[in-house]
Image (spheres, rainbow, N blue to C red):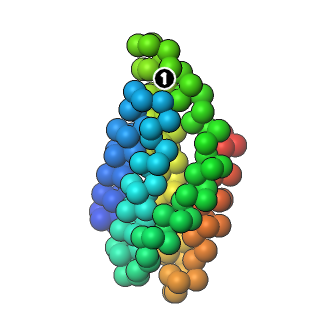
């Protein structure tokens, strides 16, 4: 799938912001901060494709899936409790997870938006769930 330059910018800007947020040396500080980043990305992708979606709705869907992603970042957050080496390793792990999931989510949303004539019919919860399931299998 070929992204437009706007879609490319939206997804990769969100992924970079997610990486910076997830690399925080404070254990468990990133989870709540990733939701607004990913919600902004999704609403931006909708707008770039001529559709609208409520950012509040998107945040609700992402919060519901955040519980499921908790285990994926648990190791990185626990490592952050170890001074210096653990903080660096934990931040690196979490940044990688945040970038991968944010980009996968962005690509999936664009794919769904392009696959329909009515963006209101896209079940964002299922798109997010499918990305999460595919992401955790790796």
Towards the viewer: 83 or 43:
83
Towards the viewer: 93 or 112:
93
Q: Quadrant of residue 18?
A: top left
Tell me the residue at 42%/20% (across/down).
88
In the rendered structure, the answer to whether residue 74 lies left or right of residue 96 reads right
Residue 106, x across and y down, in percent = 46, 59
Q: Is residue 122 visible?
A: yes
Q: Residue furthest bottom?
A: 118
Where does label 1 land, which residue?
80
Image quarter in which the C terminus is found: top right
Q: Secondary structure at mark 1?
A: loop
Q: Is residue 52 above or below residue 89?
A: below
Q: Quadrant of residue 62?
A: bottom right
Residue 96, x across and y down, in percent = 48, 35
Residue 137, x across and y down, in percent = 70, 43
Q: Is residue 93 visible?
A: no
Tell me the residue at 35%/38% (across/down).
20
């Amino acid at each position: 799938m070929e992204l437009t330059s706007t879609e490319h910018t939206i997804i990769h800007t969100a992924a970079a912001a997610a990486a910076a947020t997830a690399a925080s040396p404070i254990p468990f500080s990133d989870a709540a901060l990733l939701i607004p980043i990913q919600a902004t990305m999704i609403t931006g992708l909708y707008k770039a494709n001529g559709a609208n979606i409520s950012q509040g709705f998107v945040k609700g869907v992402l919060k519901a899936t955040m519980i499921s992603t908790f285990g994926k970042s648990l190791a990185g957050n626990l490592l952050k409790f170890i001074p210096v080496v653990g903080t660096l390793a934990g931040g690196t792990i979490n940044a990688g997870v945040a970038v991968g999931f944010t980009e996968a989510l962005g690509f999936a949303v664009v794919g769904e938006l392009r696959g329909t004539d009515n963006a209101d019919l896209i079940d964002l919860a299922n798109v997010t769930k499918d990305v999460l399931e595919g992401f955790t299998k790796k």
